[in-house]
Image (cartoon, rainbow, N blue to C red):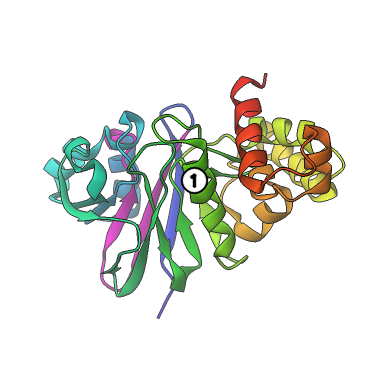
Amino acid sequence: MAHLEMHQFICRSDNYGLLVHDHKSGATASIDAPDAVEIEKQLRKRGWQLTHIFSTHHHGDHVEGNAALKNQFSCVIIGPRAEADRIPGIRTKVSGGEAFTWAGREVKVLACLGHTLGHIAYHIPSEYSVFAGDTLFSLGCGRVFEGTLEQMYHSVTQFKTLSPSTYLYCGHEYTEANARFALSIEPMNRMLQQRASIVATLRREGKMTCPSTIGEELKANPFLRTDSPEIRRNLNMETATDADVFAELRRRKDSFK
């Protein structure tokens, strides 16, 4: 079976748009719908018809295009059951731990409470791809708006169980800012230093920094590295639990300039 084609682009100011296309069936999914006009433009360029939207959570910059795209393409909107009343146009409701078939491939649903109380991610194992929304970012993680820091810790930590070869697609282009914070916490991490340098070059050239891979994140993302002796030493939390280290990292990131 040929691999799915992934087409990623920037919309709004820093949202990632992502179209996932199966050439055999013609099925095309938009991961979230930040901007209906830009998504339609990208579809038209490729001659694709939108068949599905995979919504990760209810925030406006992720669902604002749902209604217009559904009206135009009659696409099926899949989204979190726990936020169904806040996902415009939703038809298929899913929860963490469930799975469904799309374009002949299994799609596993991950519960990702924290950023919102119903946030989910979509993992397609056969494509080595995970669509994390605003839970896990390259070199960072999402803010905790509705859930608890403990919930966010468990949500982020589950990504460590995925194959290191898995591509991480996230909701925003935040990597450069995330790198600055990560370096303030783990400055001697050579893999992080190298990643930060690459990211800075990409951004100077106006290029996107994602997707990364789970393997790259495990080596450089502080929110996946709560057992790092350097991080724990710099936080003065050598004997703390991983969950407590994560919570302190997230609190510090919230106020980092």
Name the quadrant of the C terminus. Answer: top right
Question: Label 1: how many residues lie within 10 Å, few (<14), some (14-19) or many (20+)?
Answer: many
As drawn, is 101 to the left or to the right of 85? right
Image point (33%, 67%), residue name? 22
x and y percent of residue 100 in the render? 27, 67
As drawn, is 156 to the left or to the right of 43? right
Find out whether residue 35 is within the magenta segment.
Answer: yes
Please tell me which residue lies in front, 4 or 99: 99
x and y percent of residue 50 in the render? 24, 53
x and y percent of residue 195 in the render? 74, 46
Residue reaching furthest to the right: 188
Please tell me which residue lies in front, 147 or 224: 147
Residue receiving disc 1: 170
- The answer to whether one can see residue 157 in this image is yes
As drawn, is 51 to the left or to the right of 207? left
Say which amino acid is labelled 1: Cys
Image point (80%, 34%), residue name? 236
Element type at mark 1: loop
Question: Is 178 placed above or below 91 here?
Answer: above
Find out whether residue 10 is within the magenta segment.
Answer: no
As drawn, is 31 to the left or to the right of 228? left
Image point (51%, 67%), residue name? 128
Residue 117, image quadrant: top left
Question: Is 81 placed above or below 215 here?
Answer: above
Q: Which residues are magenta?
A: 15-37
Residue reaching furthest to the front: 239
Please tell me which residue lies in front, 145 or 99: 145
